[in-house]
Image (cartoon, grey):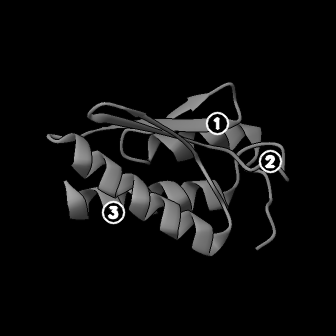
Amino acid sequence: MEEKLIPQEEKERRVSQLNGWKLTDEKFIVKRYRFQEFLTGVQFVNHIAEYSEDIQHHPFISIDYKMVTLKLTSWNAKGLTELDLSCAERYDELYDSIK
């Protein structure tokens, strides 16, 4: 999939349509997911890792006890792309299926 940058004037609007994702530094989107149990968060990260490996697009992942933070950007495009937004939607679906 070709990674085409989302135009600057569209970024905030497009990110605001995502559930809980925030635009940072004009090229990343970030979201924190909270879990009731530590191991449920780890299980979520494993699902994220499998999906990300399948599509060869990997987020930054941070596990802080019961909180998992995901941060996305497209390095080849040097910013935010449709692939990042579609990944964010998929990660939300994975969260909804596991929480």
Secondary structure beneath dot 2 equals: loop
Q: Which mark is residue 8?
A: none
Quadrant in the picture for the N terminus: bottom right
- At x 80%, y 47%, the residue is 75
Disc nearer the start of the sequence (1/3)? 1
Secondary structure beneath dot 3 equals: helix
Task: Tell whether 80 sits left or right of 29.
Answer: right
- At x 44%, y 47%, the residue is 17
Q: Which residue is mark 3?
A: 93
Q: What is the three-letter code of the residue carrying label 3? A: Glu
Which dot, 2 or 1, sits closer to the camera?
2
- At x 68%, y 67%, the residue is 56
Q: Which residue is mark 2?
A: 75
Examine the rendered structure and indicate whether residue 56 appears above or below residue 15: below
- CB atoms of marks 2 and 1 within 8 Å: no
Examine the rendered structure and indicate whether residue 6 appears above or below residue 35: below
Q: Which residue is mark 1?
A: 28
